[in-house]
Amino acid sequence: MLLFDDQNSEAAMRKLVALGHFDFGAASSVIYECVVVRKGRAITPILEQELRKENFAPCLAAFGEGSSLCPSNLQTSKRLRTLLQRIEADEPCTIVR
């Protein structure tokens, strides 16, 4: 996830947002969310576009229904909304390397 911290191209940010369809555990989720929030308003249109999909199938396509790696559509939607709110609030996020 940290590889995306310094990558600001649209393609890199789209890949980063796509990773949000997977559940890699609590520690990785904290890092993921921080990296996304640090992108700020540059990633907002991609997050909004993803939120409008309402069906988050990439994880299910990769790992199948019921996989512990795949959050529900509701969980993914909530995560996207939370990220957008944190970005809108200019919430600071620091990653110690």
Image: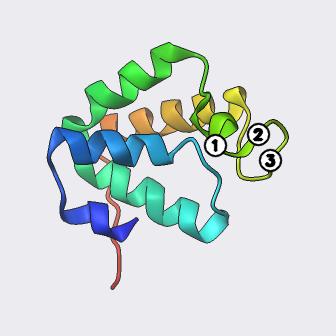
Q: Residue at x 59, y 27 (%)?
A: 56
Residue ID at (58%, 16%): 54
Q: Which mark is residue 62?
A: 1
Q: Residues within 10 Å of mark 3 (few under 14, many from 20)?
A: few
Q: Would you identify the image quadrant in which residue 89 lies? A: top left
Q: Is residue 76 left or right of residue 30?
A: right
Residue holding disc 2: 64
Amino acid type, residue under disc 3 in the picture: Ser
Residue 13 image position (x, y, % from top left): 27, 44
Rendered image quadrant of residue 11: top left
Instruction: Assign a secondary structure to mark 3.
Output: loop
Local packing at callout 1 (Cα closer than 10 Å; few below 14, some 14-19, many 20+) is few
The C terminus appears in which quarter of the rendering?
Answer: bottom left
Task: Using the image as rendered, state which of residue 95 and residue 14 is in the foreground.
Answer: 14
From the viewer's perspective, tell me whether residue 58 is left or right of residue 18: right
Q: Are marks 3 and 2 in contact (CB under 8 Å)?
A: yes
Amino acid type for the residue under numbered disc 1: Ala
At 26% from the left and 37% from the top, the residue drawn is 43
Mark 3 vs mark 2, foreground winner is 2
Name the residue at the bottom extreme.
97
How far apart marks 3 and 2 lie (CA) works out to 6 Å
Please, which colouring scheme is shown? rainbow
User: Residue at coordinates 51% horizontally, 30% vertically from top-left?
Assistant: 81
* Residue pointed to by mark 3: 67
Q: Identify the element where label 2 is drawn.
A: loop
Left or right: where does residue 10 sit relative to residue 82?
Answer: left
Q: Is residue 37 above or below residue 31?
A: above
Q: Earlier in the sequence, mark 3 or mark 1?
A: 1
Q: Are marks 3 and 1 in contact (CB under 8 Å)?
A: no
Q: Quadrant of the N terminus?
A: bottom left
